[in-house]
Amino acid sequence: MNLDPVLVFALSFVWGVLVALLSRGISGWCIGIGLPTVAAAAYIVYLAYGVPYSGGGASMWPIALVVLSGSAAVCSAAGVGLVYLLRHCLQR
């Protein structure tokens, strides 16, 4: 049961946009970036420890944890930043 990284990026971006639309200030940044990062990390840890390992060789979950969680944070930050930038530009 693998999750497509493009789906993670898209969901993180959409989550960032939704949170930024519903909240203002630093809470929008914290919730918008924090939740996708923690969700991606939890999913990878679940795959590493909750699902029996079916592949051969070394387990690559620590690298996937850093890369996928970091990418989720960047995509959600882009969504939050886009809304704040549009909100700032449209107020003028």
Image (cartoon, grey):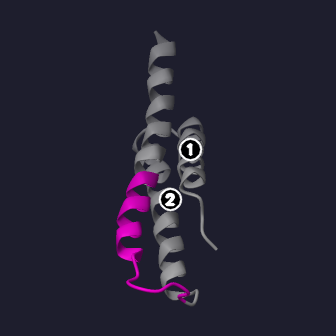
The residue where tag 2 is placed is: 35
Q: Position of residue 83 (x, y in %)?
A: 51, 30
Residue 42 sits above or below residue 82 on the image: below
Residue type at mark 1: give it. Val
Q: Main secondary structure of the magenta part?
A: helix
> Residue at the spot x=58%, y=46% of the render?
10
> Residue at the spot x=40%, y=47% of the render?
74
Question: Hey, which residue is sitting farthest front in the picture?
Answer: 56
> Residue at the spot x=54%, y=43% of the render?
13
Q: Position of residue 80 (x, y in %)?
A: 48, 38
The residue where tag 1 is placed is: 19
Asked whether 61 falls inside the magenta stretch, the response is yes
Residue 78 sits above or below residue 8 on the image: above
Q: Position of residue 86 (x, y in %)?
A: 50, 22
Q: Nearer the viewer, residue 84 or 56?
A: 56
Residue 91 sits above or below residue 36 on the image: above
Q: Start and end of the magenta stretch?
A: 53-72
State the SS at label 1. Answer: helix
Residue 19 placement: quadrant: top right
Q: Position of residue 64 (x, y in %)?
A: 41, 68
User: Which corner quadrant holds the N terminus?
Assistant: bottom right
> Residue at the spot x=56%, y=39% of the render?
17
State the SS at label 2. Answer: helix
Alpha-carbon neighbours of circle 1 within 10 Å: few (<14), some, or many (≥20)? many
Residue 84 sits above or below residue 36 on the image: above
Q: Are marks 2 and 1 in contact (CB under 8 Å)?
A: yes
Q: Nearer the viewer, residue 26 or 77?
A: 77
Residue type at mark 2: give it. Leu
Asked whether 56 falls inside the magenta stretch, the response is yes
Q: Earlier in the sequence, mark 2 or mark 1?
A: 1
